């Protein structure tokens, strides 16, 4: 007799039917899981603009800093933007109009970048600071997009700075310093505009 017929017969596994109570419980757990996923996503999204928020940016800084794999992102480009004239809008028309200006800007601005590019509302002291993060050396691309936006939507002027950085020989990528350098460039441009009467 062949070997595969030796030993006791294996029990036949029967499909167990789910009771109505278990079905309800499974449905409830599935809904809770989806709700938690949505809440988790909302935690990283700015409520007014619909863009990623400062917490999401901080998480990205930590992620890139601690990722030492050979497949880790090697270069990043960050653009730091500050809306011009928002204070003037708030003072003249009220913060409701200022919020609308931010919301409209964010909605239009997002369309100029790809889905996998990271667009943040950083929320400065007046809530008018934004960031663009691309995980490669894309200074020219971002500059081109910013210029295109400014030409198409001159009612949403902004000052900006762009900085690219790479991992050092030890595999460290300091996104925080890259953002800081882009911020300094933006401030320099903003100060020049102020000298020319732009607030």
Image (spheres, helix red, strand yellow):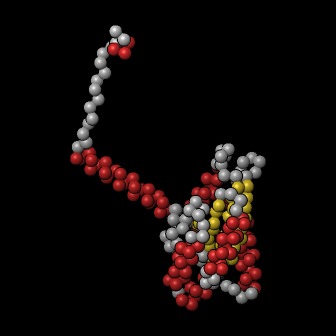
* Image quarter (top left, top right, bottom left or bottom right) of the C terminus: bottom right
Q: Is residue 92 left or right of residue 135?
A: left
* Image quarter (top left, top right, bottom left or bottom right) of the N terminus: top left
Total labels drawn: 0
Q: Which residue appears at 61% of the width and 87% of the height? A: 88
**Between 28 and 125, the one nearer to me in the picture:** 28
Percent from the top left, x then y, of residue 79? 67, 67
Percent from the top left, x then y, of residue 82? 65, 75
In the picture as drawn, the residue positioned furthest to the bottom comes out as 92
Picture quadrant where residue 138 is located: bottom right
In the picture as drawn, the residue positioned furthest to the front comes out as 1
**Against 68, is 143 above or below?**
below
Q: Which residue appears at 36% of the width and 11% of the height? A: 2
Q: Which residue appears at 40% of the width and 55% of the height? A: 34
Picture quadrant where residue 183 is located: bottom right
Percent from the top left, x then y, of residue 49? 52, 72
Q: Which residue appears at 58% of the width and 57% of the height? A: 59
Is residue 10 among what the camera can see? Answer: yes
Is residue 123 among what the camera can see? Answer: no
**Against 38, is 30 above or below?**
above
């Amino acid at each position: 007799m062949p070997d595969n017929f030796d030993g006791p017969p294996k029990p036949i596994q029967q499909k167990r039917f789910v009771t109505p109570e278990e079905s309800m419980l499974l449905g409830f757990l599935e809904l809770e899981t989806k709700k938690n996923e949505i809440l988790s996503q909302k935690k990283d999204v700015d409520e007014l603009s619909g863009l990623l928020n400062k917490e999401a940016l901080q998480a990205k800084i930590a992620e890139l800093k601690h990722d030492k794999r050979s497949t880790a992102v090697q270069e990043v480009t960050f653009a730091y933007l500050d809306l011009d004239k928002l204070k003037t809008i708030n003072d003249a028309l009220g913060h409701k109009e200022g919020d609308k200006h931010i919301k409209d800007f964010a909605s239009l601005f997002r369309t100029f970048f790809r889905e996998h590019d990271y667009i943040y509302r950083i929320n400065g002291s007046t809530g008018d600071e934004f960031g663009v993060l691309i995980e490669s050396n894309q200074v020219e691309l971002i500059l081109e997009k910013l210029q295109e936006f400014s030409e198409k939507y001159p009612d949403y002027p902004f000052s900006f700075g762009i900085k690219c950085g790479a991992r050092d020989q030890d595999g460290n990528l300091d996104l925080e310093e890259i953002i800081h350098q882009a911020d300094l460039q933006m401030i320099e441009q903003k100060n020049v505009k102020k000298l020319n009467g732009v607030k």
